[in-house]
Amino acid sequence: MHLGWALSMFLFLIHFWWWQFRLGHLVEWNFNLYLFVTLYALLLYLLCALVFSDSASEYPDYREYFYARRQWFFGLLALAYAVDMVDTWIKGPAYFHSFGNEFLVRNLAYIVLCGIAMLTRSPRFHGAFVSLGLAYQAAWIARQFETL
């Protein structure tokens, strides 16, 4: 499970930087936009730091470490999906709407599922969440961004 979320974060980072590539089309930048993108990147860094931390050695295994940190991890992950909606809007309303309702439903579903993940230690739930989440994330990227 821990390795699944590590892989998911790696894929999220690749996806994030690909989306940020689109900011090159903005004609005008300002400090607020720069600060927003920087804080978004910091949020993703914090998620990665929670997945792989020096304090993991204090736990018998990565599974216990992950469950002990799940509230922080999934709270920040839910925040990342909320910030993702704002980030997509920054690229322009037409760009935001180009993803259709699926984008909004996807992000809201991830936020709800993260809330559930914060509350449960169920291996079945967490296993399904990371497995289905990875599969969906890969499919979403393939459908949306297969070309420059």
Image: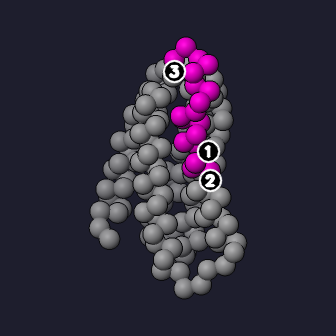
- Amino acid type of disc 2? Leu
Q: Which residue lies under the disc numbered 2?
A: 42
- Write down the quadrant of residue 83 in the picture: bottom right
Q: Earlier in the sequence, mark 1 or mark 3?
A: 1
11 sits to left or right of 43: left
Which residue is more in the foreground, 143 or 104?
Answer: 143
> Pointer 1 and pointer 3: residues touching (CB < 8 Å)?
no
Q: Which residue lies under the disc numbered 3?
A: 63
Q: Position of residue 125 (x, y in %)?
A: 49, 26
Q: Is residue 74 above or below residue 101?
A: above
- SS at badge 2: helix
Q: Which residue lies under the disc numbered 1?
A: 46
The part of the chain drawn in magenta is 42-61
- SS at badge 3: helix
Can residue 53 be found in the magenta stretch?
A: yes
Q: Is residue 34 above or below residue 128?
A: below
Q: Earlier in the sequence, mark 3 or mark 2?
A: 2
Can residue 116 be found in the magenta stretch?
A: no
Query: Is residue 42 at all visible to an observer of this figure?
Result: yes
How many callouts does the rendering have?
3
Residue farthest to the bottom, as pictured: 27
- Amino acid type of disc 3? Arg
Task: Report the residue at 61% width, 57% height from top.
Answer: 40
Query: Is residue 116 at all visible to an observer of this figure?
Result: no
Residue farthest to the right, as pictured: 32
